[in-house]
Every structure is written in C-alpha cells, then in structure tokens.
Image (tube, helix red, strand yellow):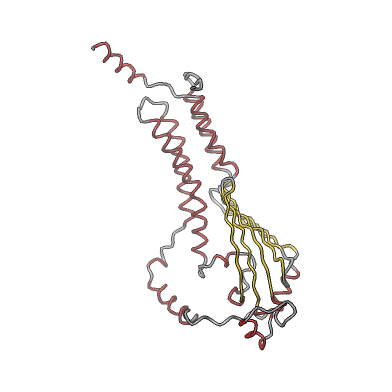
Amino acid sequence: MRLPRPRSFAASGGVRLIITALFAVHVFISAWLVASVEAAYTEGRPAPTEFHSVVAIDNEQTFVDVRIERATSFFLYTLQRDSSATAPVNSSNIDDSSFSSDSDDSDEDSPSKDTDTDWLKLGRNWIKISLVLLVLSELIMMLSWKWRHYLRIFAFSMTLIAFTSFPLFYVASLGDGDEGGSPANGAPGAEVETRSFVHTEEDLHLKPIWLGFELQADFSGYDLGLVEEEDREGVIAQPPEENETGGNAFIAFESTFNIELGKNLDSLFLLPFMWYFLPARPINHDKKVYDTLVEEE
C-alpha cells in the first residue's frame, strides 16, 4: 500500500529552499562535536579525586572546560611520590636515550615535520562546503533538470558523511599534538608517568550512543613512586599483598570518554520528510517530448 503524497504547488520550491537554508544555518552556528571525560580515582592515595572535562567544537573555535573536584588527595599524592621511580625497560625495547636521539635526528630530516596537517580545519572546511552544496542543490531543484534529484541526494549524503567523519578529524588532531603517541597522555592526571606503574590492568569497553560513541576505560596498578627505593625490586617481581610492603601503592582509576555530534545535527534528518510532503514540480519539457512522441506513433 502506497502512502498518499501531497501534490506539488507553485511555491513549494521556495518553501523547501527556505526550510533547507534555515536548517543549514541552524546547524552551522551550533556545536558540531562535544567530547566529555568523566574520570575518578577509586582506590589508592589519589582517591576520591574526580576530573570533569568538556570540549565543544563549532565552526570556528574549540572550547575547553576542565574541573577537578576533591583534589586535595591528588595534589598530596603528586607531592609524596617519587617521580623518578620507573620500572626497568625490557630487553626487547629500545633504550629511551637512543630512541629519543634517533627520533630527533629523523624528525629534522622528515619532510612531514614542516607540513603537519590541520585536521580540524580540514574537517571544518568539508562541513562548510557540504552545507553550501546542500542549499544549492535545493535551489537547483527549482530548475527543469533531470539530474536534480541525484544532485540533492548526493549533497545530503555528503553532508551526513562530513559530520559523521568529523570525530575522526578531532581524534587525528589529538594524535598530531601527542608526541608520545599514547592515548594515556591525553587522560586527566597524565603528568604522572605511566611507566612507573607495574602489574597494571586495563579494561576497555566501547559502545555506540546516539550520534556518537562512549568509551569506558579502567586502569589499575602499583605506583613505584610510592614505594621505598630498596623495596621496589620486590614489588616489580611480584604484586604485593594488601598488608605487605608496597601494598599501599595500589591505585585504581576509572574514566568514561564520550564523543558525540552536536545535538542540533539530528534536525538534518527532517529534510527527507520535507522532500516527501513538499515534492518538486514535474519537469514540463520532458512531459511535452513524451506527448509528442506518442502522437507521432
């Protein structure tokens, strides 16, 4: 059973163009991406410190808001620990000093050093071009061109792809600014060297949410910076019990990382409904040609 479709009228093209332009402007001036981190130390000396951060990205700027709650224990923890305490590097790994010197030399000779890509700018430009093309495609729908519907579908698809790909551009921009290349460096409290933790456990869960995804990450381990120097070898060799030497160096950390597209972007999904209830006028010259051919036969 086919649903009844309203007939086109003379001003339907202008109405569709105005609605499309309003939606495009509404989306353009809103936030395109919102990334939030909710994290907390659940066990150990830094507990119960909590971190709350929000990153909102629009067509021009990136807004960052970071809050730390119950931070007294965390600051005391950073003052008490020995920041120079690190676990020995495995024999299979390259020595840090040689690695850093080699990487410095290679960076000087690397042509990509001076041509780093501004991924956020690239993503923003793609979205701007897609929105302009979306409005222009609706303007072309008022013309008698047989490929006009395909152009509108293409413009709409490109707009959705541009927005859904924008989180990838954001993640790529974070990778450019992270010299260590480790995701842990972008987490709250990352100034504490993760190499000083032994017997670590990590648990990651990724799940989709509306217009985005959520990553739940749990981390735990023993911080050698809280262990006396003469006792570190024993802690490295074997995880201590709760009442043994080094047992109070256990630390657990939980975090939830959300990346979501702007809440106003779902208004774009209303455009196909507008196409159905406000159809374009038929192409008259095609109809005349068809009628002429029928009369000649």
Measured from the top left, where is residue 274 in percent x and y?
52, 29
Report the residue at 56% width, 40% height from top: 266
Name the residue: 50% across, 32% down. Answer: 272
Where is residue 76 drawn, in percent x and y? 74, 74
Location of residue 146 (image quadrant)? top left
Residue closest to the eye, 86 or 220: 220
Q: Position of residue 255 (x, y in %)?
A: 64, 61
Please tell me which residue lies in front, 186 or 249. 249
Please state if 81 lies on the left or on the right of 267 as rendered.
right
Q: Residue at x 43, y 21 (%)?
A: 281
Location of the C terminus by quadrant is top left
Vertical relation: 174 (above or below) 249: above
The extreme left residue here reads: 297
Q: Quadrant of residue 188?
A: bottom right
Q: How many marks?
A: 0
Above or below 138: residue 52: below
Above/below status of 93 relative to 185? below
**Residue 186, image quadrant:** bottom right
**Closer to us: 279 or 109:** 279
The answer to which of 283 and 57 lies nearer the viewer is 283
Find residue 21 and report its horizontal and vertical position in percent. Answer: 51, 34
Q: Is residue 60 left or right of residue 285?
A: right
On screen, residue 17 versus residue 83, left or right, reads: left
Query: Please, which residue is most extreme toward the bottom here?
Result: 230
| Relative to 252, residue 94 above or below | below
